[in-house]
Image (cartoon, rainbow, N blue to C red):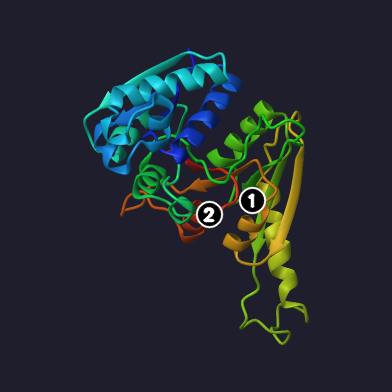
């Protein structure tokens, strides 16, 4: 049986968007959905589901939240749904769940326009330390919106074939959309036309190197996935943020743990806080 897709819920609007996305994804993957609530999340309020239950948020228990979430997920997709309420910090619970999950889905922060534009500590911690891909649901995309043209999977390409590349291919298959593979490059300002190795075009060497790195990363591309390649001059964070406005999902990798343990770079932080679409953080296989 397929590993479950795990979604963290706390009753907020943000977590309900994560729940809806996870239910649709589980249906495409033909995988079960596991809805998880950590009881200490009560401090974040469960206002959105509380309205559905017709009760003040302070009076809604974790069990009621997961039952309501499970009903919502089953009403959205024909999937198997299990639930769990755990008395523990949310970060610990979801990272533990990630050991036996195909992916973990979380929202952002979930209360008010400003708060929702930023990333909460739970989502950031899970994206940093989870053992499987983590999808942080940003924006208000809904694949079930009638008449909307399916958006591509945008893949931020690093060096060589990675777990993120393979994840993007699989998502493209599931959603029947192309992969737009993007490699950003920059020409350092101190390299001028007088550089002896650059023949009067200091940017040329960097662009050619980016093209080569992009091709190497996509060398194992499957024939059944439509693939578009793009190299763009500019900071990687800005290039990918711009691309996120036309994407259904933005996929980037997370490096293998170093001597300081797992970490997210500046590009990942920026995308998780500001992307216009859901962002998948995919850890490299150890």
Going 68% across and 43% down the picture, which residue do you hit? 218
* Residue 61 image point, x, y percent: 27, 27
Q: Which residue is drawn at 54% across and 38% down?
A: 163
Separation of marks 2 and 1 at Cα, in angstroms = 9 Å
Task: State how many labels appear.
Answer: 2
Q: Is residue 142 visible?
A: yes
Q: Residue 271 carries which label?
A: 2
Q: Position of residue 182 (x, y in %)?
A: 68, 52
Question: Could you tell me which secondary element the residue under label 2 belongs to?
Answer: helix
175 to 187, vertically: above or below: above
Front residue (pair 217, 180): 180
Circle number at residue 244: 1
Q: Circle 1 — which element?
A: helix
Position above or below: 242 against 45: below
Residue 95 position by quadrant = top left
Q: Which residue is drawn at 58% across and 35% down?
A: 167
Which residue extends farthest left? 87
Q: Where is residue 94 in the image (x, y as percent from the top left)?
A: 34, 34
Q: Which mark is residue 233?
A: none
Image quadrant where residue 148 sits: top right
Q: Position of residue 80 (x, y in %)?
A: 48, 13
């Amino acid at each position: 049986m397929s590993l479950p897709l795990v979604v963290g819920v706390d009753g907020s609007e943000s977590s309900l968007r994560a729940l809806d996305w996870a239910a649709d994804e589980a249906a495409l993957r033909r995988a079960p959905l596991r809805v998880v609530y950590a009881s200490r999340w009560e401090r974040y309020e469960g206002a959105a589901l509380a309205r559905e239950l017709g009760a003040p948020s302070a009076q809604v228990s974790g069990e009621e939240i997961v039952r309501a979430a499970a009903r919502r997920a089953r009403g959205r997709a024909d999937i198997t749904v299990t639930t769990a309420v755990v008395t523990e910090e949310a970060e610990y619970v979801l990272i533990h769940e990630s050991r036996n999950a195909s992916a973990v889905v979380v929202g952002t922060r979930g209360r008010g326009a400003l708060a929702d534009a930023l990333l909460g500590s739970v989502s950031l911690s899970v994206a940093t330390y989870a053992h499987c891909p983590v999808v942080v649901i940003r924006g208000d995309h809904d694949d079930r919106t009638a008449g909307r043209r399916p958006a591509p999977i945008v893949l931020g390409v690093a060096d060589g074939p990675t777990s993120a590349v393979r994840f993007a291919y699989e998502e493209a298959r599931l959603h029947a959309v192309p992969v737009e593979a993007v490699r950003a490059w920059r020409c350092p300002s101190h390299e001028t036309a007088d550089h002896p190795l650059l023949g009067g075009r200091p940017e040329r060497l960097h662009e050619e190197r980016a093209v080569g790195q992009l091709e190497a990363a996509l060398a194992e591309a499957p024939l059944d996935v439509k693939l578009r390649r793009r190299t763009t001059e500019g900071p990687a964070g800005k290039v990918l943020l711009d691309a996120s406005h036309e994407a259904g999902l933005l996929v980037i990798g997370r490096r293998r743990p170093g001597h300081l343990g797992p970490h997210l770079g500046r590009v990942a932080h920026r995308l998780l806080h500001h992307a216009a679409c859901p962002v998948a953080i995919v850890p490299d296989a150890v």
